[in-house]
């Protein structure tokens, strides 16, 4: 019997989940909970409950209408979700969501399970930060425990003189501190675990950030096969102990001595897995739906290398815009239907991949040639 999939969040990730589900006979429809009228998922056929992500009444309504609930953002109320486990199946479980929602709890969980991550400590007072600095040295990264995204919840503390400024920046927000790791590359592994415990992963990818926002993903990462295996093993160990069903984006740092540390876990489809829409036997979106709705996982075999480039709103502009037009056979433009551009807002992405057996460096050359076309033109 086909199932109704409820999704907390109807942004671009919800949109691509909805598109994938429309090709899957096991899913009869998708209902998203999202505060924005005509959110991206609703534009491609999802029904929408228009309410804020943590609106308990709306989450209850979503559960009553759905067979399975999942999320495309981490801000659902895990306690409300926990109370609804008899009404709908919830994957990943609210308990897993709760561990991940708080960066400190997440790091503690990793440490308890001997999974490598940067050194960290809980801090609330000036003196706690001074004492963390005496252990880890400067620079330090002060992080909001909850709710940060695209680096907005982070503050780099370069010396004792920055501490008060950093505390003022955060106000009452609960904080943690992390050693600043001198990584040579940011990588991630998109891995999935289904309800019966089957696990599949895509090869590690390389992520390039600008202004703390993911700008570009290169698949596979330009690292040795043994390092790629090491990253996959860490991801595998993480989902084994986390126990949730779904796709997980495991972000990691690669250090100069080949150490790999986990930066953070996303309990959902992840921006660095968008290339799989065009470059893999099963996209991460189909895989997530398979994982949460009781199906077997699909093959994660790659057809070949790919480059993903995010289309971001220009830094100094808010308003309507012309969607870009890209003219290259190997490029696949995916726009998210957002009416308004905001500074550095994710408006779409381009996957560069085809079956002509391009190398990664040829794909990067193609990207350079089409970057001017990918720029957003404001409508004034
Ligand atoms: P968010 O949750 O907002 O995405 P992250 O904690 O993932 O924030 O950090 C955003 C970026 O900040 C990372 O991609 C990385 O470039 C940098 N960063 C985060 N933690 C560390 C760290 N411990 N050492 C060095 N850089 C870090």
Image (spheres, helix red, strand yellow):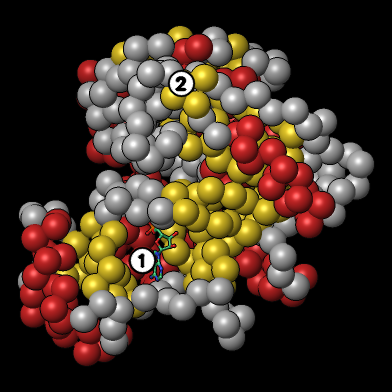
- Graded by Cα atoms within 10 Å as few (under 14), some (14 to 19) or many (20 or more), the crowding at tag 2 reads some
| Secondary structure found at label 1 | helix
Q: Which residue is mark 1?
A: 107
| Secondary structure found at label 2 | strand
Q: Is residue 16 left or right of residue 65?
A: right
Q: Residue at x 21, y 81 (%)?
A: 159
Quadrant of the frame with the N terminus: top right
Q: Is residue 6 above or below residue 255?
A: above
Q: Quadrant of residue 338?
A: top left
User: Taking the image as drawn, is residue 69 in sight?
Assistant: no
Q: Residue at x 50, y 12 (%)?
A: 43
Q: Position of residue 9 (x, y in %)?
A: 40, 27
Q: Quadrant for ligand 1?
A: bottom left
Q: Position of residue 113 (x, y in %)?
A: 45, 71
Q: Quadrant of residue 39?
A: top left
Quadrant of the frame with the C terminus: top left
Q: Which residue is mark 2?
A: 321
Q: Position of residue 195 (x, y in %)?
A: 58, 40
């Amino acid at each position: 019997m086909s199932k109704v999939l409820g999704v907390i969040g109807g942004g671009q990730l919800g949109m691509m989940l909805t598109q994938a589900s429309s090709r899957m006979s096991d899913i009869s429809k998708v209902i998203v909970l999202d505060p924005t009228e005509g959110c991206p998922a609703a534009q491609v056929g999802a029904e929408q409950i228009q309410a804020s992500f943590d609106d308990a009444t709306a989450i209850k309504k979503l559960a009553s209408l759905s067979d399975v609930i999942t999320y495309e953002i981490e801000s659902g109320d895990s306690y409300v979700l926990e109370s609804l486990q008899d009404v709908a199946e919830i994957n990943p479980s609210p308990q897993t969501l709760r561990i991940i929602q708080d960066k400190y709890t997440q790091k503690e969980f990793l440490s308890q399970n001997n999974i490598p991550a940067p050194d960290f400590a809980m801090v609330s007072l000036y003196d706690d930060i001074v004492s963390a600095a005496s252990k880890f040295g400067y620079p330090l990264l002060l992080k909001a425990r909850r709710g940060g995204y695209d680096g907005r919840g982070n503050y780099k503390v370069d010396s004792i003189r920055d501490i008060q400024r950093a505390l003022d920046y955060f106000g009452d927000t609960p904080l943690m501190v992390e050693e600043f790791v001198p990584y040579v590359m940011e990588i991630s592994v998109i891995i999935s675990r289904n309800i019966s415990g089957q696990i599949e992963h895509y090869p590690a990818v390389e992520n390039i950030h600008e202004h703390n926002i993911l700008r570009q993903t290169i698949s596979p990462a330009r690292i040795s096969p043994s390092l790629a295996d090491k990253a996959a093993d860490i991801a595998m160990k993480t989902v084994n102990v986390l126990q949730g069903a779904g796709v997980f984006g495991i972000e990691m740092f690669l250090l100069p001595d080949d150490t790999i540390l986990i930066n953070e876990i996303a309990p959902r489809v992840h921006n660095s897995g968008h290339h799989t829409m065009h470059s893999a036997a099963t996209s991460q979106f189909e895989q997530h739906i398979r994982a949460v709705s009781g199906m077997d996982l699909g093959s994660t075999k790659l057809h070949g290398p790919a480059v993903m480039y995010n289309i971001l709103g220009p830094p100094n502009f808010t308003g309507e815009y012309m969607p870009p037009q890209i003219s290259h056979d190997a490029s696949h433009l995916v726009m998210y239907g957002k009416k308004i551009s905001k500074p550095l807002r994710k408006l779409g992405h381009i996957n560069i991949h085809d079956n002509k057996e391009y190398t990664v460096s040829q794909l990067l050359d193609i990207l350079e040639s089409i970057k001017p076309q990918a720029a957003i033109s404001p409508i004034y």
